[in-house]
């Protein structure tokens, strides 16, 4: 099987820029190309499916709708939690990201929208929920994953194992 195009089971390196509402939110200018293993949910599905078949050197602009990105904004995805349910030494700040365990034991990510001494008002929407995502991507490398990377379903950057 040839591995000279973006396809499941290949590690892609890409230069990218993410623009939302005309503002650059993220780009590879700072951290260098992003590497990811295709087909394992490592990047949002709306971007990955548009990259399938690209070759090294190919560039593409991809617009991802909220439903293929970080979801629609959900007015119901808010919850008031008594301050006493959090560890007393936990620093709570507006905008802070918390991991909350629900009644079924599932971990969920939430953001502190507001709080006072008694109550913490949590927002379970992703910060980019409801946003149309404008990606500019350029494939700069393709390689086979190591067997360990395939086992884990993600890329192991040099010196950074998890
Ligand atoms: Zn790993």
Image (cartoon, grey):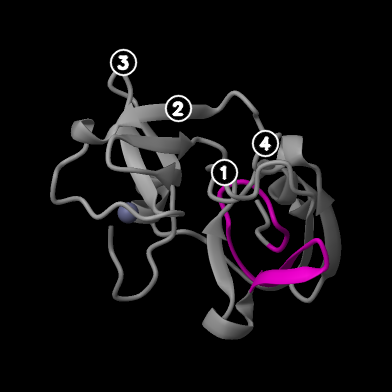
* Residue assigned mark 3: 104
**Quadrant location, the C terminus:** bottom left
* Residue assigned mark 2: 79
Q: Residues within 10 Å of mark 1 (few under 14, many from 20)?
A: some
* Gap in angstroms between the C-alphas marked 1 and 2: 14 Å
* Gap in angstroms between the C-alphas marked 1 and 4: 8 Å
Image location of residue 18, percent across then percent down: 72, 65
* Gap in angstroms between the C-alphas marked 2 and 3: 16 Å
Res. 71 mark = 4
* Residue assigned mark 1: 126
The residue positioned 75% from the left and 40% from the top of the image is 66
Q: Which residues are magenta?
A: 4-26
CB at mark 4 closer than 8 A to ligand 1? no
| Residue most extreme to the top | 104
**Any magenta on residue 61?**
no
Query: In the picture provided, is 125 more to the left or to the right than 97?
Result: right
Q: Secondary structure at mark 3?
A: loop
Of mark 2 and mark 4, the one earlier in the sequence is 4
Of mark 4 and mark 3, the one earlier in the sequence is 4
Image location of residue 104, percent across then percent down: 31, 15
Of mark 2 and mark 3, the one earlier in the sequence is 2
* Gap in angstroms between the C-alphas marked 4 and 3: 22 Å
Query: In the picture provided, is 119 more to the left or to the right than 121?
Result: left
């Amino acid at each position: 099987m040839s591995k000279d195009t973006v396809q499941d089971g290949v590690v892609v390196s890409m230069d990218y820029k993410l623009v939302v509402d005309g503002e650059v939110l993220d780009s590879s200018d700072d951290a260098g190309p992003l590497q990811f293993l295709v087909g394992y949910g490592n990047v949002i599905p709306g971007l990955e499916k548009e990259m399938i078949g690209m070759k090294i050197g190919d560039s593409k602009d991809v617009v991802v709708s909220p439903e293929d990105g970080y979801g629609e904004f959900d007015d119901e995805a808010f919850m008031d939690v008594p301050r006493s349910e959090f560890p007393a030494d936990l620093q709570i700040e507006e905008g802070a990201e918390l991991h909350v365990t629900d009644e079924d034991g599932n971990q969920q990510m939430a953001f502190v929208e507001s709080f006072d001494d008694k109550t913490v008002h949590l927002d379970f929407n992703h910060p980019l929920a409801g946003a149309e995502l404008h990606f500019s991507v350029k494939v700069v490398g393709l390689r086979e994953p190591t067997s360990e990377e395939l086992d884990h379903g993600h890329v192991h950057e040099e010196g950074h194992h998890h």
